[in-house]
């Protein structure tokens, strides 16, 4: 199981839905009320994970009749339903995880879901958060590349303290062995000048948000 799509119970806009419907994956997991999104889009998950408190009766009946397995967890637990789905995907050998419906709505859940990317179990997995035309993922030392188009927007945000030794290429506002300080917004809204942005960093973790076109 290489490429996994996990659909959570947050907001799922039409643009994100369009992206999901035009990408193929090896495994589709619905997280609790994410199964409602799947039903609305005509998608059939291979597994539904969670305490199931957000499923509509219609969705529950629909996927039960279809024979879709449920991994049910108690409502009182230390991990969120999305967290359990992510860890389960890692145990199954996922190499690339796409998260949709993980943002929007409640601010506390949005922040917590972004910070889930830092879990050590996910370090060797490429995890992307999709929302509208934006793709969000982590960048770690020593280097990484992001494919885009000239005019696209790229924001680089320090996520675990300062990011040191940052050098970029292919962007309108290049950095050369510089430091992005945690809690400052200097890395926001850079612009692709080439189809490939190259990022090198010596220490720290960057949250990279790539938006097709101008954000």
Image: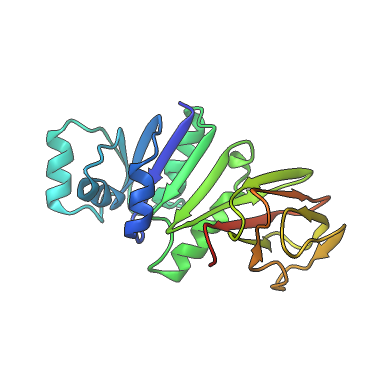
Q: Quadrant of the N terminus?
A: top left
Closer-to-camera residue (202/62): 202
Q: Residue 109 occupies which quadrant of the picture?
A: bottom left
x and y percentages locating residue 43 in the rendered image: 25, 40
- 88 lies left or right of 158: left
* Rendered residue at 85%/62% (across/down): 178
Q: Is residue 94 left or right of residue 62?
A: right
Q: Which residue: 51% across, 60% down?
A: 112
Q: Residue at x 42, y 59 (%)?
A: 132
- Residue 171 in the image, given as x and y percentages of width and height: 71, 58
145 on left or right of 38: right
Q: Position of residue 212 (x, y in %)?
A: 52, 57
Q: Tell me where residue 58 appears, x and y as whole percent.
A: 12, 50
Quarter of the image where one finds residue 6? top left
Residue 192 vs residue 205, the one in the foreground: 192
Coloring basis for residues: rainbow
Is 141 rendered above or below residue 171? above
Q: Please, is residue 101 above or below residue 23 in the view?
A: below
Residue shown at the point (77%, 53%) measured from the top left: 169
Q: Is residue 185 left or right of residue 13?
A: right
């Amino acid at each position: 199981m290489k490429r996994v799509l996990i659909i959570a119970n947050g907001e799922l806009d039409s643009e994100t839905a369009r992206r999901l419907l035009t990408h193929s994956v090896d495994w589709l997991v619905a997280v609790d009320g994410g199964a409602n999104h799947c039903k609305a889009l005509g998608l059939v998950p291979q597994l539904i994970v969670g305490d199931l408190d957000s499923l509509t009766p219609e969705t529950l009946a629909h996927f039960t009749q279809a024979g879709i397995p449920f991994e049910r967890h108690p409502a009182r637990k230390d991990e969120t339903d999305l967290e359990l789905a992510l860890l389960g995907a890692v145990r199954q050998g996922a190499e690339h995880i796409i998260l949709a419906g993980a943002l929007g709505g409640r601010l506390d859940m949005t922040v917590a879901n972004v910070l889930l990317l830092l879990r050590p179990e996910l370090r060797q997995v490429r995890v992307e958060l999709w929302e509208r035309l934006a793709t969000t993922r982590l960048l770690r030392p020593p280097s990484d590349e992001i494919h885009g188009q000239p005019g696209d927007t790229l924001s680089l945000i320090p996520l675990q303290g300062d990011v040191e030794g940052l050098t970029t290429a292919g962007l309108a506002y290049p950095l050369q062995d510089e430091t992005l300080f945690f809690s400052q917004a200097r890395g926001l809204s850079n612009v692709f000048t080439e189809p490939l942005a190259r990022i090198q960093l010596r220490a720290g973790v960057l949250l990279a948000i790539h938006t097709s076109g101008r954000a």
